[in-house]
Image: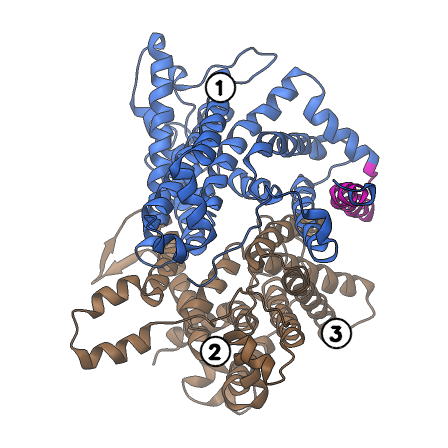
Chain colours: A blue, B brown
Amino acid sequence: MKNPRGLAIQIGFLILPIAISLAVAAALVIAVGRDPLEVVDALWKGAFKDSRKIGGVFNFWIPLTLVSIGLVVTFRAGLWNIGVEGQMMMGALFASWGAQYLLLPESLSPLLNVILIALAAVGGMFWAFVVGALKIRLGVNEIFGGVALNALVNVISIYLISGPWQPRIGGSAQGTEPFPTPALLPEFAPTFPVNLFMIALVIAAFVIVMIMLNATRWGLNLKAVGANMRSALLLGVATERASMSAFLVCGALAGIGGSYRVLFTFDNLRPLASGGIGFLGLLVVLLLSIRLLWVPLIAFAFAAILTGSTRLQIAPSLKLDSSLAGVLQGMLVLFVILFHGVQEVFFPQTLADSADTETIESPSNE
Amino acid sequence: MNEEFLNTLGSIIGTATPLVIASLGETITERAGVVNLSLDGSLALAAVTGFAAAWTAQEAGVLDLPAQIAVGIAAAMLVGALIAVLVGFSSIKLRRDQVAVGFVLTLLAADLARFLGADYTRIPGPQITRFAIPVLEDIPVLGIVLFQQNVLVYFSFILMFAIWFWLFRSKGGLALRAIGERPEAAYARGAPVQRLRYWYTFLGGALVGLAGAAYSLNVKPGWSSPPAMQGDGWIALAIVIFGGWHPFRVVLGAYLFAALRAISGYIQTNGLFIFGQEISFPFVLLNTLPWLLMIVTLLIVSGGLTERLLQYMPRAVQRRLRAFLRSDPPRALGARFEAE
């Protein structure tokens, strides 16, 4: 920053969107006759009261960070992978299939875990491939292809849960029977119920994708494709292959995220097991203007809000709908985007030296 | 023709109406060059606002039913218009990407609807009543199908023709199409591009809001979570593409979707009989049909597959079929315009 005034404006634009989102959320809480401070207290306790709760935050953080890393890749290539939610779900379905039909003894549980996670990655890639093929080969906009495929996999999962995979006793649309223990991912400790292998996997994915995006030809190609499809093509970048590879990477990561939901969080397959985490990942990445570096941190904050919000319904003095979490997250992202616009349009000089920001620009009609 | 069949057609027209109105609203917004991707959330928020407003008016006990409905509709339209204008503002004034803002607003509006709607879940409220049009309702066949409906259905008929007339037969419509196709040229000829874009975004959004009210005050009365119309906003957006941004074809698309839903709903409750033989399969899979139709229609109009199939046809047929099947978006759709 060159001058103190520029710095002040910069900081102001960092704080303002957060402050306004919080203020509007507080106003909403007051409007429905509750105390905002009590909401803050409930959110905090719901997320950080003890090590079990913090474990709960990590259990949202793991799939959320995985999909967000994947979405950075697709956004780099200029693709709107709204189908990420369905790719998570397809991963969950593949893992659930394996968990029910690949029966290995307890002693081989780690091997089975790895197989199931790999299966989930394949499932996610499969669903991402369909979106990609529809987009690249057949010209169907990936947003609509993705939305349709999200809905399709949800119907398929409900069919499986109420049909072939229904519990032997009391079959309903609630969920499958709990999977056999060897299939489930083990928890670190009852006081900190998290799977450490998955955390390691998230960190590995983060590092690998970071290197791939910034230090390989593949990363460069993606960026070229994302920036301008036509000129990338003219420069000799295999645009179709680059786009498809972005979809596949994102699908694999989303699929793994989906497997965590069924193999750890729920221990069985439920309808909508992906729980909106894919969409939340889109918000995380939009908030960051596609900067990978901050993804784990923002994902942690969003996961904490999500975990804390479960307490809103339970707390006797509140009895608030947990959708408040989504409202807060949505507003945060909206105001960050809008204020970024205000800064760019009215204070362009304060942006001059932050060249690492990428603006999201949809290639509307190519 | 048998009466039950005609009644079914009538109910398809009725249940399609929110889709018709929302898709027509989005059509004029997109014709002006703005994509309002927030439809799915907007519909939900407008629906719950409309219902809550009408319900509150009812509880107050001062207004009669038509006035309660009017209050609900006005509130819903306002919500839809405000969200749309926010998309327009962020694009026109703040140079943000319309798709990004629209998508965030979809999620935000849907969550806001759930949050604000919590106290209105599954309670009875005012509903729009049927109003058969005298004389017209007695026309054989058409009377039952078209003229024993409610006011919103009649409005949707008028709206379709009005938008068609405005787009293709009026001077204002020429400007509307121009700002969506070639804003620079339109600007050079003196069209106030940005002002018109705001105006049509507002108008389109208001219609989306009206569609939301059409759900909560008529087609799916009341409010529940997850909302009954979840997913319809995306279907409406796809219908606009399928309809090639032409009001008649858009409306046709909406009826097609509603008909498919009616058929799959009918089979799920009554079973499927072919030549008196009961066919059984997991009916829950029928719920995939609207989404498969969405993919198929987009496949047909988006080019890739159609082009390949057309190669096998005789030349003379090729051109006409292409013109019939393909639908190309307004050229400046989603793009920002800056006057220098």
Same chain for labels 2 and 3? Say yes or no.
yes
Magenta range: A7-36
Helix, strand or loop under label 2? helix
- In x, y percent, where is residue A318? 77, 36
Q: Which mark is residue B247?
A: 2
Mark 2 closeness class: few <14, some 14–19, many ≥20 residues within 10 Å: many
A227 relative to B264 in the view: left or right: right
Tell me the chain of label 1.
Answer: A
- The Cα–Cα distance between marks 1 and 2, rounded to whole angstroms, is 54 Å
Give the mark toward the camera: 2 or 3.
2
Give the mark toward the camera: 1 or 2.
1
- In x, y percent, where is residue A66? 49, 32
Q: Which residue is drawn at the image coordinates 51% and 16% (left, top)?
A: A196
Majority SS type along the magenta span: helix
* A18 part of magenta stretch: yes
Q: Which residue is drawn at the image coordinates 38% and 72% (left, top)?
A: B327
Q: A214 above or below B183?
A: above
Q: Which residue is drawn at the image coordinates 35% and 54% (left, top)?
A: A233
Residue named by callout 3: B67
- Quadrant showing the N terminus of chain B: bottom left
Residue named by callout 1: A200
First in sequence: mark 2 or mark 3? Answer: 3
Helix, strand or loop under label 1? helix
Tag 3: amino acid: Ala
Helix, strand or loop under label 3? helix
Tag 1: amino acid: Ala
